Amino acid sequence: MVFWILISFVALSMTALLGLVLLRAHSVGEPPAAYDLRVYRQQLSDVDKDLLRGVINESDAQRVRTEISRRILAADAQLQKQSTGNTQPKGFSRLTVLLTAALLIGGTLATYAVLGAPGYVDMGLASRIEAADQYAQSRPNQAEAESKVPALPSPDLEPGYAELVAQLRQTAGERPDDAQGQALLAQHEANLGNFIAAYQAKENYIRIMSGDIVAQDFGEQAELMIMAAGGYVSPEAEELLDGTLTLDPRNGPARYYYGLLQGQLNRPDIAFKVWADTLRQGPKGAPWINGIEAQIAEMAFRAGVDYTPIAPPAAPGAAAPALAGPSAEDLSAAQELTVDERQEMIRGMVSRLSDRLATEGGSAPEWAQLIGALGVLGERDRAQAIYTEAKTRFSTDAEALAGLEAAAKQAGLAP
């Protein structure tokens, strides 16, 4: 209702403004000749004043009077012509106003009916999350998605390669319990662009191995299913991603596809957090990192996050970057502040660190630094909430958990 009130008010306001201009055109101001006539008459009286003061002589005064009189006669004739000429009928102006109003208001409604979304309800955050959950439960499955994917063009193959793959298919079909044969078949079917056959062979491999597999196996099958569905992450592929991340929460490809899934489910907020953490995890130049870097800015925009590219993770063996903290200039300036001003400066630094970790993620030492800073400020409840969240994020990293626990104890929190 608020939307309709606003667009109606705008349309009516524009109509009223245009109508006012058209209707007032009959009575606004006076003909230009009337103004010219007043000016010439004033000039004529000024000639007599100049003559009395001796500014001009009689002959010059007579010549000026003649010229001004000529101009007065011309202006008067023009004024008479304008006063007796035809003017625009008021009825025509009123009709123009009505037609303009109908065109403006009707055109606005017609345009919105074509380009807008009539009847679309307000979508607050809770409503959007609920709609995303409903879509997640009812979205197309793997078979439905595959049926909508157009056939891929045949790749350029080396001579004899297709025959070798055909022999491999025959051999794998004759030996259905040969795990190595199914693994090779999955690889070569993918090379040919036969992603459905590829993930089916990978599924056979996982079945044959009877649990003696690694997280990467689930992730590879999920990736093949996503490619077979044209980039769509189906419920079946999601289940495989969940299995991958359960075994290996830091698996880069699975984290990339999990973020892609959340974007497709209209949860860019979750997708952005997953991708931001994965970028920090690295390594720089990995295929999934390149994919995230190409899309994370758009995902941040959808999530309403003011995103700036983060620095890539340090190379193995490189020194760890220094944690965020006051610079030498900050420390020097702090010496001149009062106790309250110093406290406010510290709170500002803590707030910036907290916002960055919430939107972009960060390392375990940075989370520990935030917990310790909140403990120093006496914000125990907030520090406890941050500690709980950090333990969830680094639940599989024993070293990180130890550092977080040490920071929590130092801040006076319960273990």
Image (cartoon, helix red, strand yellow):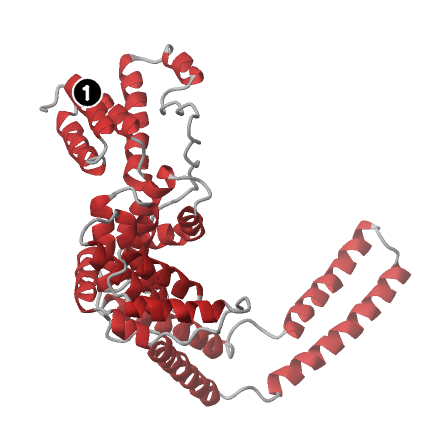
Work out which quarter of the rendered image holds the N terminus and state it.
Answer: bottom left
Q: Where is 364 relative to 179, above or below?
A: above
**Front residue (pair 147, 304):** 147
Count of number-bearing discs: 1
Q: Position of residue 329 (x, y in %)?
A: 44, 16
- Residue placed furthest toward the top: 335
For residue 241, what is the image quadrant?
bottom left
Work out which quarter of the rendered image holds the C terminus and state it.
Answer: top left
Q: Secondary structure under badge 1?
A: helix
Q: Position of residue 405 (x, y in %)?
A: 17, 24
Q: What's the residue at 46%, 79% (across, down)?
A: 23
For residue 87, what is the image quadrant?
bottom right
**Front residue (pair 306, 339):** 306
Q: Position of residue 211 (x, y in %)?
A: 18, 51
**Front residue (pair 114, 37):** 114
Q: What's the residue at 20%, 21% (across, down)?
A: 407
Q: What's the residue at 39%, 22% (across, down)?
A: 322
Residue 238 is left or right of residue 42, and the answer is: left
Q: What residue is pinned by disc 1?
A: 406
The amino acid type of the residue labelled 1 equals Ala
